[in-house]
Amino acid sequence: MAAPGTTRDLLRLRLGVPTSGRPSLAAATTSGIQVIRQDPARVSFILVNTGGNAAFVGPDLPTRPTGLDGIRIDPFGGALLVEWETDGEMVGWAWRGVSIGGPTTFYLLENVIDQGRTPRAGGPAASP
């Protein structure tokens, strides 16, 4: 096998499946809203608060983040990085955000398993 020549080659070798980046924009409100949809094929994401208000985020579970708790992301560049190796399956869950003092915007970059590919034995499986 040839030596990996790119970061994509290294990721494919480590994960056993090809992945691709998926950028998007999201927003949070003071009443709370889902900012990341559920996707079990996601292996990591970075959520950057590009807006002018702080926000709290967390998994969209029965105990949702509020304006007083959750994971705080500061305005103008604060970020949250979640990856499967350290954070487990919650990387694929839906996430909710609540902004403080007014709405805020996020830049979201997800790394997802390419759909329709078959993983090697023991590797993570892609969602249908």
Image (cartoon, rainbow, N blue to C red):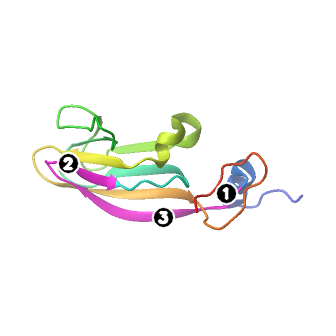
Residue labelled with disc 3 = 22
Q: Nearer the viewer, mark 3 or mark 1?
A: 3
Q: Amino acid at mark 2?
A: Gly
Please tell me in which quadrant of the rendered image residue 127 appears: bottom right
**Sequence order check, earlier mark of 1 and 2:** 1
Compute the Cα span from label 1 to label 2: 36 Å
Label 2 element class: loop
Residue at 53% of width from left, 56% of height from top?
111
Q: Amino acid at mark 1?
A: Thr
Q: Nearer the viewer, mark 3 or mark 2?
A: 2
| Nearer to me, 96 or 24 | 96
Compute the Cα span from label 3 to label 2: 23 Å
> Would you say the residues marked 3 and 1 are in contact, meaning their CB atoms lie under 8 Å apart?
no
Seen in the image, is 23 located left or right of residue 76? right
Q: Quadrant of the N terminus?
A: bottom right
Q: Which region of the structure is painted magenta?
A: 17-35
Residue at 55% of width from left, 58% of height from top?
112
Q: Residue farthest to the bottom? A: 116
Residue 63 at what x, y percent from top left? 28, 34
Q: Residue farthest to the left? A: 101
Please tell me in which quadrant of the rendered image residue 12 appears: bottom right
Query: Which numbered dot is residue 32?
Result: 2
Residue 108 at what x, y percent from top left? 39, 57
Seen in the image, is 102 located left or right of residue 35? left
Compute the Cα span from label 3 to label 1: 16 Å
Residue labelled with disc 1 = 7
| Nearer to me, 5 or 20 | 20
**Sequence order check, earlier mark of 3 and 1:** 1
Q: Quadrant of the C terminus?
A: bottom right
> Would you say the residues marked 1 and 2 are in contact, meaning their CB atoms lie under 8 Å apart?
no
